[in-house]
Image (cartoon, helix red, strand yellow):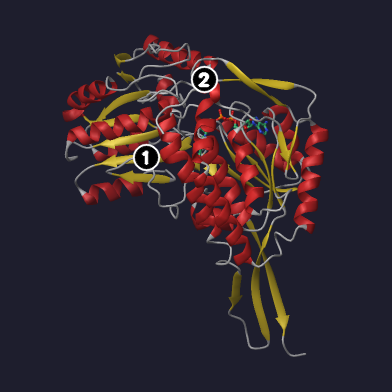
Amino acid sequence: MDRFDPATINVRSGHFIDGEYVDAGASHIEVARPSDGVIYASVPIADAALIDRAVQNAWTAYGTSGWARTAPRERARVLRRFADLVAADADTLAPLESLGSTRPIRDAFNWDVPFTAEGIRFYAEFADKIGGDVAATDHDHLGMTIAEPYGVIAAIAPWNFPLVMASWKIAPALAAGNAVVLKPSEMTPFSVLRLAELAVEAGVPPGIFNVVQGDGRTTGDALVRDPRIAKVTFTGSTRTGAAIMAACAESGTKPVTLELGGKSPQIVFADAPRLDDVARRIVGAITVNAGQVCVAGSRLLVERSIADELAERIVNFFGELKAGPTWAPGTTLPPIISEPQAVRIDTIIERSVASGATLRGGGRRADAATPGAFYMPTLLANVTPDTEAVRHEVFGPVLTLQTFDTEEEALELAAHPEYGLAAGVHTADLGRALRMVRGMEAGTVWVNRYGRTSDFMIPTGGYKRSGIGKDLGRQAYEANLRFKSVLIDVRL
Ligand code: NAD
């Protein structure tokens, strides 16, 4: 699918509790399409009473539905069916995802939906694989650890990849036998409702996968603080992550998984093969989803001798991108999520230029056929580690350029005072690549590529202020389990 007519998309709104749509809330939030700013639907804001109802329902379902107690292979079978239904629903899910988000329809159809389905399938396969361990003890005892679900897990998701980010939370939680209450971003609230519907259709008991709608201050905070929530898993900004961690501490020392912001460097050495390919990779890493990606490769560090040549190629490739609404064919530069966010990007660039940075491309709104907030891919040179665009997560198609002469200098520039989410190294020298891998404080390092493959076993998560814990991989499955130690005296 490479296009759709936004006027033909039917949006179902509400919360999804106990297997049913619920339209309750003291007030509503109007939801706009980033592609043209048109308000196309509204969502109710769940208040404390509704959160109480949703979590209580989840608790009851957790205790009575048998989801946690069923044979793990049966849970896996249901989740595989869920994954199949998601994949088969692409004609509905992809436009629904694309309509109100920044995901171009071609990407939503070819990547977001199948990747969501495959993530669910991946975790289904874990359901009967990790049950605990038997310990080496003396002959008078049998010692073991038993893996058990937490109970009800609260999952809070951001807007940049609404389905995929939600699936990274709900799939391991459900596979491990938990019930989930998911709060999507208030800016992209609808596609996960369809996901929850499909879960019930696949046989996930009603009440095991719930969706509550609302903003962070009212709904998210009430959800995190609910005493029946056993664990919180969150993806979003570092600032919100800190607030959630504090709320978890204040409401009962709940464990948290936090996937947070980043300011990821890409280091290019002069020996990197095929400079055109390198330039394309770098452009992709800062313009996919218009740079609204946690792991966006936003700080380019280049060996001085090739810096000008690489910059020129990057700016040329920037020129090939086509700004347009998510529903138009051929869109490769989607909109910024909201007008205030586009203004924020512009302000950061203005202030960076005022402090001495020079523009080598972009630095302004893009022309597009619709009145949405589009921003030109931007390259900023003559920056220092203190330049605002280098220091802060911009969350837009903004790349900064710094040069280095030695490996030590590259590592020094790569280190960010707060973030440590991801990094890229481009070089033909394996030893040098490994020295960079070892030398950087980052949760993920890509060598001669940038970005994930579909290898779900490789986890993602940040060092430093970029997060705590991992999504994906075995680690994310185990993070949805508690391990009970049992020691039996066998002499009786
Ligand atoms: P955000 O922090 O503003 O919001 C994320 C979610 O948290 C939303 O659902 C929001 O309603 C909710 N929320 C806000 N305040 C809350 C509170 N006090 N209590 C509970 N919930 C609250 O982030 P965003 O703008 O939606 O997403 C962009 C950010 O997410 C960027 O910083 C990006 O780097 C980060 N991100 C990280 C990853 C990762 O894997 N590390 C992936 C995607 C996005």
Give the amino acid type for the residue marked by disc 2 in the picture.
Answer: Pro
Task: Say left or right for 40 vs 65.
Answer: left
User: Relative to residue 193, is residue 309 depicted above or below?
Assistant: above
Residue at left offset 34%, top offset 12%: 356
Residue 8 in picture, x, y percent from top left: 54, 24
Which disc is residue 313 wearing?
Answer: none
Badge 1 crowding class, 10 Å Cα cut-off, few under 14, some 14 to 19, many 20 or more, is many
| Identity of the residue furthest to the front in this view | 8
* Front in this rendered view, residue 207 or 56: 207
Which disc is residue 34 wearing?
Answer: 2
Q: Earlier in the sequence, mark 2 or mark 1?
A: 2
* Front in this rendered view, residue 397 or 411: 397
Mark 2: secondary structure: loop
Task: Say left or right for 417 vs 13.
Answer: left
Badge 2 crowding class, 10 Å Cα cut-off, few under 14, some 14 to 19, many 20 or more, is many
Q: In which quarter of the image is residue 236?
A: top right
Q: Can residue 233 be seen in this view?
A: no
Quadrant of ligand 1: it is top right
Give the amino acid type for the residue marked by disc 1 in the picture.
Answer: Ala
Mark 1: secondary structure: strand
Which disc is residue 423 wearing?
Answer: 1
Residue at left offset 58%, top offset 35%: 191
Q: Quadrant of residue 162?
A: top right
Q: Quadrant of residue 65?
A: bottom right
Residue at left offset 77%, top offset 53%: 61
Residue 450 in picture, x, y percent from top left: 33, 40
> Which quarter of the rendered picture does the N terminus lie within?
top left
Residue 195 in picture, x, y percent from top left: 60, 42
Task: Say left or right for 365 vs 190.
Answer: left
Q: Is residue 88 visible?
A: yes
